Image (cartoon, helix red, strand yellow):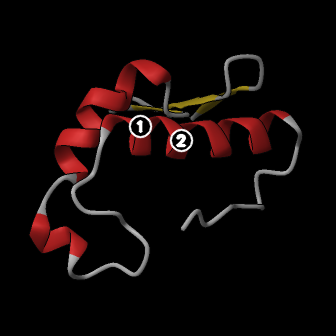
């Protein structure tokens, strides 16, 4: 396992873990815009929009960059 602090990635033989990026917003929207997922969560909006995905992606990235990756925000 290799941790790249500069790029905030963890690389193994089988996969690369990285923070979500704005370019992932369309895929996140498609995956989260599912009623079966919505009805089993507390705070997931439905229908799930691209704006929801962009907002969700921004918070973990900002917290990680500020060395506060343990914090999260719930936007209602």
In the foreground, 68 or 58: 58
Q: Which of the 4 image quarters holds residue 42?
A: bottom left
Residue under label 1, please give it.
Answer: 51
Q: Which of the 4 image quarters holds residue 53?
A: top left
Q: Mark 2 falls on what kind of element?
A: helix
Whole-percent x and y of residue 59? 66, 44
36 w.r.t. 23: above or below: below
Whole-percent x and y of residue 54? 47, 34
Residue under label 2, please give it.
Answer: 55
Q: Which of the 4 image quarters holds residue 41?
A: bottom left
Residue 21 shown left or right of residue 28 in the figure = right
Quarter of the image with the N terminus is: top right
Residue 39 shown left or right of residue 20 in the figure = left
C-alpha separation, residue under disc 2 versus residue under disc 1: 6 Å
Whole-percent x and y of residue 37? 19, 69
Residue 2 shown left or right of residue 23 in the figure = right
Circles 2 and 1 in contact, beta carbons < 8 Å: yes
Seen at 52% across and 46% down, the residue is: 56
Seen at 24% across and 32% down, the residue is: 27
52 w.r.t. 54: above or below: below
Seen at 23% across and 71% down, the residue is: 38
Seen at 21% across and 56% down, the residue is: 47
Quarter of the image with the C terminus is: bottom right
Q: Mark 1 falls on what kind of element?
A: helix
73 w.r.t. 1: above or below: below
Indicate which disc residue 2 carries: none
């Amino acid at each position: 396992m290799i941790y790249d602090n500069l790029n905030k990635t963890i690389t193994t033989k089988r996969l690369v873990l990285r923070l979500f990026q704005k370019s992932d917003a369309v895929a996140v929207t498609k995956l989260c815009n599912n009623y079966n997922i919505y009805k089993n969560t507390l705070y997931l909006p439905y229908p799930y929009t691209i704006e929801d995905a962009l907002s969700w992606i921004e918070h973990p990235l900002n917290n990680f960059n500020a060395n506060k990756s343990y914090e999260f925000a719930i936007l209602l």
